[in-house]
Image (cartoon, rainbow, N blue to C red):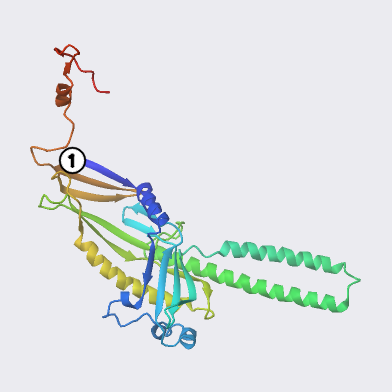
Amino acid sequence: MFVIGVSDFLVNSAAFVYFTGNMFRVKYTDKTIPKEVPFRLNTQNVGSFLPELKRQFPGSPMELHLEARKEPKLHFHPEGLDVSILGRAEAFVVLPDSSLVPVFTLSVKRKQEKGGEKSKRRGEGGNREGEEEEEGGGGGGGRNRKREEEEKGERRRRKGRRKEGKEKRKEQEKRRRTEEEEDGKDGRRPPTQKGPDCDLTGQISLEAVRSGDSLAKVGGSLALKDLRLSQEWSRIGEIKLFSLEILLKLAGHVALAGLNRKLRAGKLLPNIYGARLVDPEVSMHEGYMLIKTDLQLPLPLQLPLPNPVLWAAGRADRVEEGGSKKREIPPSPA
């Protein structure tokens, strides 16, 4: 029996190579969606969630470009494999002349990626600026009265905006704590645990094959765990992200159902000198995966290895200048 270990570092290095090679880019058109799916990729269907899109571009086909903003992060743990993805979705309308018009761009983010701390720091900075302005305004006795009234009005508006931002941040923090408590009640994650939430979770399987034409069969499964969107840019005004999240989650489950059928069928690993794995076992641990298996090899084993005896015999006889043969001891290979 031999044991193979696969660490987080190995799979994340592979993900980095694929990311730098632009392998995490996908383009979806209406032709890529199966015909049996009732939802079509056009402004008529997508406009059900975005009325302004249907009003500006009635009856037009669409394209959806998906790409990863950063390399995916993979992590092994006893329950399986977590995959965290930070992506971007860019939607286009296809005009009659086949040109593309960008209509909106969305970012796929983790649950904790909300920018609350940045907003808080900006708000604190705004408070300090307002205080400085108030202090400076007290000593401006020689200013024009109209100018002072305008500055006071501007300060009141800034205070109002800061108050609204503070209430919004409180609501976001309350929502985040509620979600963490629900995760803890469901047993998915303790409320005190911190760290990024994964987007996908998966399992890896390894099966032995009877035929000697393959080393083994590898398979697995994937499930969508979480999906959060944020609006980067929009030509059609503000987008209701909640409706789109529901739509994309449904689309993700449909896509993963087809992918899981292929994963359950498995993929045969290439044959290596007629060897095959016997009773392989895959176990997940914190930060790494272990593969324990026996190995069956056919005998006699035909390996293309150099033969040192034949190499020495070929160097043994050397013809001297006089035509006589002299047996020499060949030098040992370096």
User: Foreground residue, 333 or 270?
Assistant: 333
Q: Residue at x 44, y 88 (%)?
A: 58
Count of labels in the image: 1
Percent coordinates x, y for residue 185 in the rendering: 39, 65
Q: Amino acid at mark 1?
A: Met
Q: Is residue 267 above or below residue 40?
A: above
Quadrant containing the C terminus in the rendered view: top left
Quadrant containing the N terminus in the rendered view: top left
Residue 227 shown left or right of residue 319 in the figure: right
Quadrant of the image occupied by residue 329:
top left
Q: Residue at x 75, y 73 (%)?
A: 155
- The residue that label 1 is drawn on is 1
Q: Residue at x 9, y 41 (%)?
A: 298
Q: Residue at x 21, y 40 (%)?
A: 2
Residue 215 shown left or right of residue 161 in the figure: left
Q: Is residue 187 visible?
A: no
Quadrant of the image occupied by residue 272:
top left
Q: Is residue 295 above or below residue 226?
A: above
Percent coordinates x, y for residue 124 in the rendering: 67, 63
Quadrant of the image occupied by residue 166:
bottom right
Q: Is residue 288 visible?
A: yes
Residue 137 shown left or right of residue 246 in the figure: right
Percent coordinates x, y for residue 218 in the rendering: 22, 55
Local secondary structure at mark 1: loop
